[in-house]
Amino acid sequence: DLHSFPTRRSSDLHIVAGTRSNRFSQRFFRNAPNDGIVAVAETALPKARHVALPVGHTFMMNDVRVRAEIRAALAAAAP
């Protein structure tokens, strides 16, 4: 359960959501922003830093923008 993880401050949880999907998946999401698998609205959590980038779900971990967001979040959390 995500809510059971201990956090020091509200910015400890950093969520990166994708907004690039294909035409086929768009009809399931009724034009709501999504990455082809998950709607952006489904990724939001209270007190979490949230960013949406134009990447698809399957390979988002390989995208340089996603990696930059992760590096920035880790650097900001470093003591």
Image: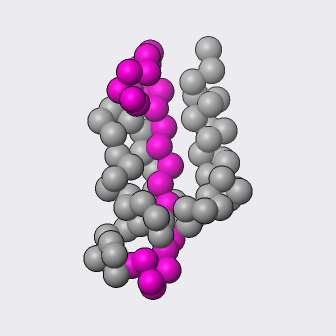
- The answer to whether 78 appears left or right of 47 in the picture is right
Q: Quadrant of the C terminus?
A: top right
Instruction: Write the residue at 50% across / 80% down.
Output: 22
User: Can you give x and y, in whole percent of width and height, for residue 56 in the image?
Assistant: 56, 66
Check the image and report above or below for 46 versus 65. above
Instruction: Write the residue at 46% across / 50% down.
Output: 51
Q: Is residue 2 magenta?
A: yes
Q: Given the current orientation, which residue lies at the most extreme front position?
A: 1
Q: Which range is magenta? A: 1-26
Picture quarter containing residue 1?
top left
| Number of numbered callouts drawn | 0
Check the image and report above or below for 18 versus 23. above
- The answer to whether 3 appears left or right of 13 in the picture is left
User: Can you give x and y, in whole percent of width and height, for residue 58 in the image?
Assistant: 60, 62
User: Can you give x and y, in whole percent of width and height, for residue 23 in the image?
Assistant: 45, 85
Check the image and report above or below for 14 versus 31. above
Picture quarter containing residue 40?
bottom left
Instruction: Write the residue at 48% across / 38% down.
Output: 14
Instruction: Write the residue at 57% across / 35% down.
Output: 73
User: Can you give x and y, in whole percent of width and height, for residue 59 in the image?
Assistant: 65, 61
Any part of residue 19 in sight: no
Check the image and report above or below for 79 versus 36. above
The residue nearer to you, when weighing 51 against 38, is: 38
